[in-house]
């Protein structure tokens, strides 16, 4: 007898192609040309990295986003299909280019990003609602990359998140970095949305910018009890979970990164995977840190690990079974 299949997870947000350029030791001056070692295309965006991580862990992601009518859209659809990812919620915007991120990777794995929004200009709540027959089947709905979606901003997402919560779905939120400079309006609208968020997954810099603070502790205090659970990603310093009065910290693994692009997204989905399994919070944090680590140490085209491979990586890098 086979076990009951895992329920799907809805990923609603920014799916795009990344052109990864490495290794960049310095940027050229205007009218200057420099040589780099390699360039490749990847299925990416927060939604893309979340979905690929989910598939590696044996989950069933349902992606809702917008792409253009071009070769990059075909590349995305082919890549999603090859990974076994359900992309029936990815809509084509005619006469539009697909969102493209150009990722410059430095010699320490650091990155700089330039993004062309393209079809993401048309990603909206209305797009998500057109696929609600599928989204309503998902225990969790992951809203992602909203700062890159002019028609699906945190302000736009408030009534949508409220409806999801009212029918018993878990709202997960990671809007990524704000390229608009963290205006007062964006910060206020994001904080308003937090009232309907069950799990918020910022990195430390994002949390501090959102709350106009200097440390994650100050940021969490300023955030208050708006979100049900806050998990702060701290890069090499690990991660911390705050839920009510409970604070659980987990140190990072001693790694040399080859490319940190998407690390936070891998962490997010790995944490959600372990949360679904109802592991203790420290174990969830360790698993998520190890999953992100297993991806960022890879050079070239990535492979996304399953649960056994994540734990093997954690063990090989000196981690115990929990934080």
Image: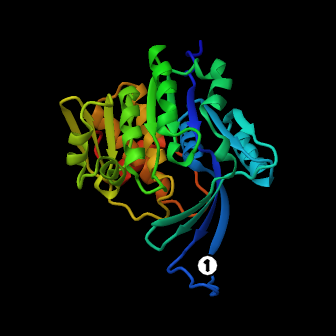
Q: Indicate the position of residue 119 as horizontal and vertical percent values.
A: 69, 47
Q: How many marks?
A: 1
236 or 76, which lies in front?
76
Mark 1 element type: loop
Q: Can see residue 247?
A: yes
Q: What scheme was used to colour the molecule?
A: rainbow
Q: Can see residue 312?
A: no
Q: Indicate the position of residue 144 as horizontal and vertical percent values.
A: 51, 40
Q: Is residue 9 left or right of residue 130?
A: left
Residue at horizontal 26 percent and vertical 50 percent from the top: 251
Q: Is residue 289 above or below residue 11?
A: below
Query: Residue 199 lies in what quarter of the image?
Result: top left
Q: Is residue 83 above or below residue 139?
A: below
Q: Is residue 67 left or right of residue 218?
A: right
Q: Is residue 86 left or right of residue 220?
A: right
The extreme left residue here reads: 245
The extreme bottom residue here reads: 32
Residue at horizontal 69 percent and vertical 52 percent from the top: 118
Query: Residue 28 lies in what quarter of the image?
Result: bottom right
Q: Is residue 79 above or below residue 84?
A: below
Q: Quadrant of the C terminus?
A: top left
217 or 298, which lies in front?
217
Q: Indicate the position of residue 232 as horizontal and vertical percent values.
A: 32, 45
Q: Indicate the position of residue 47 as horizontal and vertical percent values.
A: 57, 42
Task: List the residue tagged with mark 1.
Answer: 36
Judge the density around disc 1: few (<14), some (14-19), many (≥20) Cα neighbours within 10 Å.
few
Q: Quadrant of the N terminus?
A: top right
Residue at horizontal 43 percent and vertical 63 percent from the top: 257
Residue at horizontal 47 percent and vertical 59 percent from the top: 260
């Amino acid at each position: 007898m086979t076990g009951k299949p895992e329920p799907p997870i809805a990923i609603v947000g920014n799916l795009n192609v990344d052109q990864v350029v490495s290794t960049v030791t310095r940027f050229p001056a205007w009218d200057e040309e420099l040589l780099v070692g390699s360039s490749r295309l990847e299925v990416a965006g927060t939604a893309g990295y979340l979905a690929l991580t989910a598939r590696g862990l044996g989950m069933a992601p349902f992606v809702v986003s917008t792409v253009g009518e071009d070769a990059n859209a075909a590349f995305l659809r082919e890549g999603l299909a090859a990974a076994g990812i359900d992309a029936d919620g990815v809509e084509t915007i005619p006469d539009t280019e697909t969102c493209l991120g150009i990722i410059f990777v430095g010699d320490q794995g650091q990155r700089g990003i330039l993004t062309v929004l393209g079809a993401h200009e048309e990603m909206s709540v209305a797009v998500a609602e057109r696929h609600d027959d599928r989204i309503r089947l998902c225990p969790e709905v992951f809203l992602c990359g909203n700062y890159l979606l002019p028609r699906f901003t945190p302000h736009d997402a408030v009534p949508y998140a409220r409806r999801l919560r009212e029918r018993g779905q878990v709202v997960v939120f990671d809007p990524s970095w704000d390229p608009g400079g963290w205006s007062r309006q964006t910060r206020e609208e994001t904080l308003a949305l937090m009232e309907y968020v069950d799990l918020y997954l910022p990195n430390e810099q994002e949390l501090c910018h959102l709350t106009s603070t200097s440390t994650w502790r100050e940021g969490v205090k300023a955030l208050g009890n708006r979100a049900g659970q806050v998990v702060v990603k701290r890069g090499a310093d690990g991660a911390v979970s705050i839920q009510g009065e409970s604070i659980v910290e987990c140190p990072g693994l001693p790694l040399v990164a080859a490319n940190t692009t998407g690390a936070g997204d891998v962490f997010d989905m790995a944490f959600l995977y372990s949360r679904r399994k109802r592991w203790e919070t420290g174990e969830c944090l360790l698993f998520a840190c190890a999953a992100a680590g297993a991806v960022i140490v890879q050079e070239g085209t990535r492979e996304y690990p399953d649960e056994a491979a994540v734990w093997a990586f954690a063990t090989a890098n000196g981690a115990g079974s929990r934080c």
